[in-house]
Amino acid sequence: MNNIKQTLIRLLPDCLFLLYKGYGWYGDFRCWEEAKKITEGYESDNILQTVKESSLKVKNGEAVYERDSVLFDKIEYTWEVLSALLWIAAQNKGSLNVIDFGGSLGSTYYQNKDFLDKIPHVLWNIVEQPNFVKEGKVSFENDRLKFYFSIQECIENSPQPVDIILLSCVLPYIEDPYDLLTKIINKKFPYILIDRTGFTLNNRDRLTVQKVPSSIYKASYPSWFLGEEKFRHFFKSNGYSLVMDFEALDVVNIPSKYKGFLYKLG
């Protein structure tokens, strides 16, 4: 039944879905600036405030799980992500140092905290927008969870080398995803873990605009769906081998598939 529903959602034209639902992904824009002109952006203070309120409820034990500021009464694990983290920690004799790029106020950290707490030495470093970093340092930072303004700042201040960088639902919202990936690859992290990233079905990059449901918060922003063949070739040509790929949780209204990947240097 879920597969039938997902197919029907994807068959509905972008404009009709947006008109009917009031939210979703639509368009095929020529460039980032063209898409950005008609969006409200991710920098809005109302987004930070909404995410903060939800994240504090998880931190304080008033809610079980938060994703994109939405609270859930049951944790939806991405078992492939968790198994990758535990696998790397096992290889490092119980040590794990993560950069969670675009990790909000700790969504993935708190999602997996019950498992991470069993690892003797964990450092979870979030690199985010300045307003999120400032709030994170005040309200969420502790001896395991840290917040930084850039990858380089994290590397310079980390007491041990970074084992893995995680990009969960991040690349679609970067103006030039491959420019970011190039900068990350140049850091020579042992592992790169990607989750919740949308790919087209025709292997062509597509730039859309995403309108967020008003029940979550008022926002809209450009959003990429990448060509998978180009994506895979990029990592292979830069010295990273694929450890595993997997299906991600997301389902949207345009023809696409959401996936995750674990890549290893060498």
Image: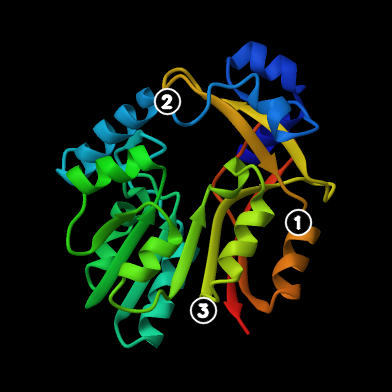
Q: Residue at x 46, y 17 (%)?
A: 214
Query: 10 Å neighbourhood of mark 2: few (<14), some, or many (≥20)?
Result: few
How far apart marks 3 and 1 lie (CA) works out to 22 Å
- The residue beneath circle 2 is 44
Up the image or down, 120 lies above or below 146; here it is below
The amino acid at mark 2 is Ser
Q: Nearer the viewer, mark 2 or mark 3?
A: 2
Near-viewer residue (156 or 55): 156
Up the image or down, 170 lies above or below 160; here it is above
The first of marks 3 and 1 along the sequence is 3
The quarter of the picture where residue 157 lies is bottom left
Q: Residue at x 73, y 26 (%)?
A: 34
Near-viewer residue (233 or 196): 233
The amino acid at mark 1 is Glu
Query: 10 Å neighbourhood of mark 1: few (<14), some, or many (≥20)?
Result: some
* Residue 190 disc label: 3
Mark 1: which secondary structure? helix
Q: Is 120 situated left or right of 11 in this image?
A: left
* Residue 228 disc label: 1
Q: Is 37 situated left or right of 148 in this image?
A: right
Q: Nearer the viewer, mark 2 or mark 1?
A: 2
The answer, for residue 21, to whether it is visible in the render is yes
How far apart marks 2 and 3 lie (CA) works out to 34 Å
The quarter of the picture where residue 232 lies is bottom right
* Residue 83 disc label: none
Q: Quadrant of the C terminus?
A: bottom right
The amino acid at mark 3 is Pro
Up the image or down, 215 lies above or below 153; here it is above
Residue 40 picture location, percent across and down: 53, 21
Q: Is 165 situated left or right of 141 in this image?
A: right
Up the image or down, 115 lies above or below 216; here it is below
